[in-house]
Image (cartoon, rainbow, N blue to C red):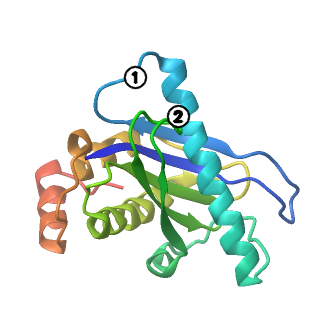
Amino acid sequence: MVLAFVLLAPGGPSPVGSGPCRVLYARSFGPPPQGRLLRKEQLLAVARQVASHCHLQQASSGRPPAPTLPEDPAPLQTAPGGLFQLPPGDPFPSRVTVTWLAATAVAFALVCEPHENLVLAEGTLRLLAGRLMAVLRPPGPTVLLRPDAADLLLDRLLPHGQLLFLSQRFLQALERDGGAPWP
């Protein structure tokens, strides 16, 4: 089961200035923790870890950071990403695995239970990222997301935090059942 989805602006040094890591959108699945503040802290801790991995990957690649979102989300299939684990209590009560994907000015992450199919989680994350890039506007450091579009996407592709085997035929069926193309 997926415990959370996080969309973040990693911050850090860039041609347009530097800034802290910001959570742009987050959605939790499963039983809520003790309080809303605790969940926000958990998701922010995940976002900081993802931002750190993004910065390390970017620094090791030797490429300068790009300040804007790409017009074509197709390069997301080859976008850098990875996996890491967080130990129990840091910040979740049990061990979790995080799969992340860096996409120019933003990053995406799925927080999964340790026994989850990570290949399926990575594929789902790339699909979500591609669809969400279409609704992120304006490009650049002041990215805004239409939360209703993100909620609709997550409801269809991660119902109640369950990873689905998503074939092209399945995605086309979802589009037909919804009556209109979805983001």
Q: Residue 175, percent across and down?
A: 19, 58
Of 160 and 53, nearer the camera is 53
Percent across and percent down for residue 49 are: 61, 52
Does any portion of residue 134 appear in the rendered image? no
Q: Residues within 10 Å of mark 2 (few under 14, many from 20)?
A: some
> What's under tag 1, amino acid-wise?
Pro
Instruction: State the quadrant of the C terminus.
Output: bottom left
Which amino acid type is marked by label 2? Gln
Q: CA distance from mark 1 to mark 2?
A: 10 Å
Q: Residue at x 70, y 46 (%)?
A: 21
Q: Position of residue 67 (x, y in %)?
A: 75, 65
User: What residue is shown with label 2?
Assistant: 42
Asked if marks 1 and 2 touch (Cβ < 8 Å), the reply is: yes
Secondary element at image label 1: loop
Q: Residue furthest top?
A: 35
Relative side of 170 to 139, left or right? left
Say what secondary structure mark 2 lies in.
helix
- The residue wearing badge 1 is 33
Residue density around tag 1, few if under 14, some if 14–19, many if 20 or more, within 10 Å: few
Depth check, front residue: 47 or 143: 47
Q: Is residue 152 left or right of residue 169?
A: right
Front position in the image: 142 or 129: 129
